[in-house]
């Protein structure tokens, strides 16, 4: 009998990785399988989007613990809540827009209010698809940040995802993971980094600029820091993968200096990382200006991801130009 090759991501999934960049295929799916082998309570659910949220890897490895709920997101999260009530640990995947816009009430009242261990896995967060406003979840963190007790994780790369999954499973209450799917860049292994839920990490020191970033924008911040070095600008990068609860101590310690402070996020400027940082700065009375690099408060265009990232200021080129303009 010929051994079957391991499942990889769907070829239909666009990648935001730069040409030649190291990537890992379907890190979430493989991490979920590993976590489920260690904990028999873990189950996987999806709403007709298995291969588009990398849940198909789990489905093949553990078909008896995989549940396909069809195109019914409210049912998906209602069922996940019921499973959690019985002691199971569900990971329920769909696109972020469908979780936040279609199923909010079910997530809020069936999952968050009773504090159930349901892990919401949202694909296509922010500007990771060119399909336009129907699929671009540019406001997902703004919607979910107001739910009491909901943990929000915005991973940078495959390293973050692989290390976050078991920690999310162990977290007693509900969690939301902004899923990077498909061929996901592998970046943070070069920076002596480990993911710790609720913690921000200084992954690169610098004396002139401090980037506070989350999600794929930490990758861009690191690339921008390398390019800024050619302009004799020394940039630090603080990665904040957990948006809620937020590690104010680490971030404010880095913000409260003479350096230019810039937040970078793959999310609208409303209600995400920038406003989380800015509110912490105001509460502490730091009197520090913070410059946001984020998506605009508008519905975005459809198109190719590299073009859109450059148009809306998320590309490395645009980040470097923005910093040089402010120095």
Image (cartoon, rainbow, N blue to C red):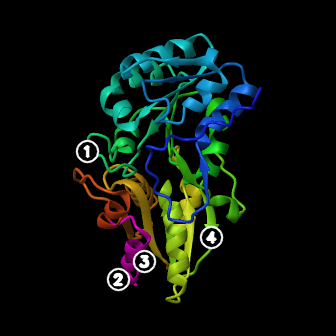
Q: Any mark on residue 133, and which?
A: 1
Q: Position of residue 239 (x, y in %)?
A: 56, 59
Which image quarter is the C terminus in?
Answer: bottom left
Earlier-in-chain disc, 2 versus 1: 1
Q: Residue at x 28, y 55 (%)?
A: 303
Between disc 4 and disc 1, the foreground one is: 1
Left or right: 19 in relation to 278: right
Q: Nearer the viewer, residue 129 or 277?
A: 129
Task: Give the camera-side residue of 211 and 259.
Answer: 211
Residue 215 location in percent, x, y? 50, 53
- Identify residue for label 4: 204
Instruction: Write the residue at 34% across / 49% down.
Output: 271
Q: Upstream in the sequence, badge 2 or badge 3?
A: 3
Of the pair 70 and 279, the residue shown nearer to us: 70
Residue 204 position in % (x across, y down): 62, 70
Q: Earlier in the sequence, mark 3 or mark 1?
A: 1
In what element is the residue under mark 1?
loop
State the residue in front, 303 or 128: 303
Q: Residues within 10 Å of mark 2 (few under 14, many from 20)?
A: few
Residue at left offset 62%, top offset 50%? 24
**Label 1 neighbour load within 10 Å: few <14, some 14-19, many 20+:** some
Q: Which residue is mark 3?
A: 320
Q: Are marks 4 and 1 in contact (CB under 8 Å)?
A: no
The residues colored magenta run 313-327
Residue 178's place in the image compared with 45, above or below, is below
Query: Which of the marked residues, 4 or 1, is nearer the chain's N terminus?
Result: 1
Q: Was residue 6 drawn as part of the magenta stretch in this picture?
A: no
Secondary structure beneath label 3: helix
Q: Tell me if residue 324 is in the magenta stretch.
A: yes
The tag earlier along the polypeptide, 4 or 2, is: 4
């Amino acid at each position: 009998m010929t051994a079957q090759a391991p499942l990889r991501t769907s070829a239909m999934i666009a990648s935001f990785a730069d040409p030649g960049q190291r990537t890992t295929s379907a890190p979430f799916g493989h991490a979920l399988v590993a976590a489920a082998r260690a904990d028999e309570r873990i189950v996987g659910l999806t709403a007709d989007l298995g291969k588009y949220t990398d849940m198909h890897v789990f489905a093949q490895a553990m078909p008896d613990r995989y549940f396909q709920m069809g195109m019914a997101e409210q049912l998906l999260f209602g069922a996940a809540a019921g499973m959690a009530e019985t002691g199971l640990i569900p990971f329920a995947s769909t696109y972020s827009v469908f979780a936040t816009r279609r199923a909010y009430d079910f997530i809020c009242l069936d999952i968050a209010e009773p504090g159930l261990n349901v892990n919401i896995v949202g694909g296509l967060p922010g500007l990771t698809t060119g399909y336009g406003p129907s699929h671009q979840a540019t406001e997902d963190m703004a919607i979910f940040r107001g739910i009491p007790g909901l943990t929000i994780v915005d991973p940078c790369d495959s390293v973050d995802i692989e290390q976050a999954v078991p920690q999310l499973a162990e977290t007693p209450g509900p969690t939301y993971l902004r899923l990077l799917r498909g061929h996901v860049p592998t970046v943070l292994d070069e920076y002596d980094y480990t993911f710790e839920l609720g913690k921000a990490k200084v992954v690169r020191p610098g004396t002139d600029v401090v980037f506070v970033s989350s999600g794929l924008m930490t990758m861009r911040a690191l690339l921008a820091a390398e390019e800024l070095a050619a302009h004799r600008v020394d940039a630090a990068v603080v990665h904040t993968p957990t948006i809620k609860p937020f590690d104010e101590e680490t971030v404010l310690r880095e913000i409260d200096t003479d350096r230019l402070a810039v937040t970078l996020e793959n999310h609208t400027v409303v209600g995400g990382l920038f406003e989380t940082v800015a509110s912490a700065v105001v509460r502490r009375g730091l009197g520090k200006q913070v410059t946001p690099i984020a998506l605009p408060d508008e519905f975005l265009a459809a198109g190719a991801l590299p073009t859109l990232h450059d148009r809306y200021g998320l590309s490395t080129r645009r980040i470097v130009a923005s910093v040089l303009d402010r120095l």
